[in-house]
Image (cartoon, rainbow, N blue to C red):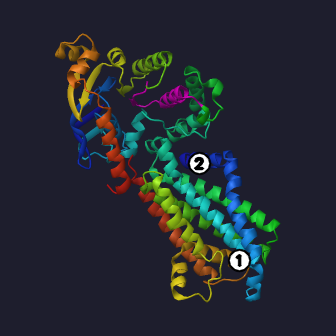
Amino acid sequence: MIRVRNLKKDFGSFTAVNDVSFDVEAGEIFAFLGPNGAGKTTTIKMLTTLLKPTAGSIELDGLDPLTHQNEARKRFGIVFQDPSLDGDLTAWENLEVHGVLYHVPHKVRRQRMEELLKLFELWERRNDQVKKFSGGMKRRLEIARGFLHTPRILFLDEPTLGLDPQSRNQLWTHVKKVNETEKVTVFLTTHYMDEADRVAHRIGVIDHGKLVAQGTPKAIKEQTGAESLEEAFLALTGSTIRDESAGAADQMRQFAKMWQGGRR
Amino acid sequence: MSAIYILWLRELKRYTRSRAQIVASLGQPMLYLLVLGFGLGPVFKRAGNGNYFQFIAPGVISMSVLFSSIFSGLGLLWDRQFGFLKETLVAPVPRIQIMIGRTLGGSTVAIIQGLLVTLVCVLAGFRPVNFATVPIALGFMLLIALLFAALGVAIGSSLQDMQGFQLIMNFLVLPIYFLSGAMFPLADQKLPLRIATGIDPLSYGIDGMRSVLLGTSFYGVYTDLTVMVVLGALLMVFGAYRFSKIEI
């Protein structure tokens, strides 16, 4: 369903994603793990047509997102890592805009909106402007929005960030459900290793832009001789904290973007 | 089509929900209109140019259209900052439709704003010479709104954050306004100023408004119309192109 070959992305002299290749089968839940700044989000952005790769090829359901942008976009849904809601609109209107943009027929749309708002416990607040929501509520709304249309591939970029255990549990139950009943392929990133271990069929570990391991959670644990996925992850990526370098890289990107504009 | 509609509706909803902003954005045109309009009136009259308030009203109406349309285009920057832009960019809708929806929404808001200022002008004593031509003036308002909303989108697509905003304001939006002849007659100016006003698209928009509302024109109404339509179309294409190139 997703086929990535020798994917590379440079921001100036900094290489965010370096020669990454992997496959995700149809109906699979694939977890993409890595420390901060390892290149997870950059990879997702390239997969979802938001960034152009420097080199390498991508296929989504047999389509190249570079040449068949719109066709490819029809295939996937995404829950972003950082907020992407319109704060001036209400929860209901945010979903409505999404549903219209994704061509969900009116009747189905209304019905699913109601279901999802109830499922993520936002129904009572549906007519409130999103800017009045708490962080957790916004997060839940974004996730609900991701499920509004039924894509063939669902990208979840750290979906559980800032969620309480109840909502997290709700989310993963729902992810598993759509994966099983509607055969949706799921590509997710997370920092919670136990979640990846529980939900994912296969895992890829990325560090410094390179894919350092991939396989089933069991295989990865065996490969490193670790008891838990967390241990295996630390064995693969080391235990130094990455925030610092990630911040610098991000800043550099920001800086480069600011001056180059969209001219790249 | 439905994508264009929903994005247009979104712009409108955002506008009607920010009431404080609506009132605030009326403040500046009112200052120009009432203070300059009445303050410079006697001097203008003595110089033999007629009623300054009548003269400045189309300029002030255009100014409010200019400001709100260009800022709606630059609203891209807010959407980029707060993330909503991503949501529209990954949607399975051609980007041209997203750009059109935004631009039409921004233009509609600008026209509403322009009509509010028009109302203030009429209340303060502005009278067009011929009421039959008022719809044509509305057409010029629409052209101004579309042209500058497209310009705003083109610029907003190229800027990455809010830091460039002041730059745009001081080196683009204000010069466009001041050089447009909104506040002074274009006739009998020295060459440098004549060139500067000649390359400012707003000059033609305002001149067009004056020609239909007051019956006085510098470039001639057909020149005004041609320049606005051609330049508007070009900027529309350019804005759509820039928008299609956005990477996040």
Q: Position of residue A166 (x, y in %)?
A: 50, 15
Subunit ID for the residue under disc 2: B
Which label sits on residue A93?
Answer: none
Q: Position of residue B213 (x, y in %)?
A: 73, 76
Q: CA distance from mark 1 to mark 2?
A: 31 Å
Q: In the rendered view, tell whether residue B195 sits above or below residue A187.
A: below
Q: In the rendered view, tell whether residue A16 sits above or below residue A113.
A: below
With A205 as the anchor, is B61 left or right in this view?
right
With B92 as the anchor, is B13 left or right in this view?
right
Residues shaded magenta: A133-160
Q: Position of residue A84 (x, y in %)?
A: 49, 38
Q: Nearer the viewer, mark 1 or mark 2?
A: 1
With A117 as the anchor, is A183 left or right in this view?
left
Q: Position of residue A92 (x, y in %)?
A: 61, 33
In this view of the protein, which residue sits in the foreground, B208 or B180? B180
Q: Callout 1 environment at 10 Å: few (<14), some (14 to 19), or many (20+)?
A: many
**Residue at horizontal 31 percent and vertical 41 percent from the top:** A248
Q: Are marks 1 and 2 on the same chain?
A: yes
Q: Determine if residue A187 is in view.
A: no
In this view of the protein, which residue sits in the foreground, A153 or A18? A18
Q: Determine if residue B169 is in view.
A: yes
Which amino acid lies under the numbered mark 1 shown in the image of this protein?
A: Val
Q: Which residue is mark 1?
A: B212
**Residue at horizontal 55 percent and vertical 73 percent from the top:** B201
Q: Which residue is mark 2?
A: B5
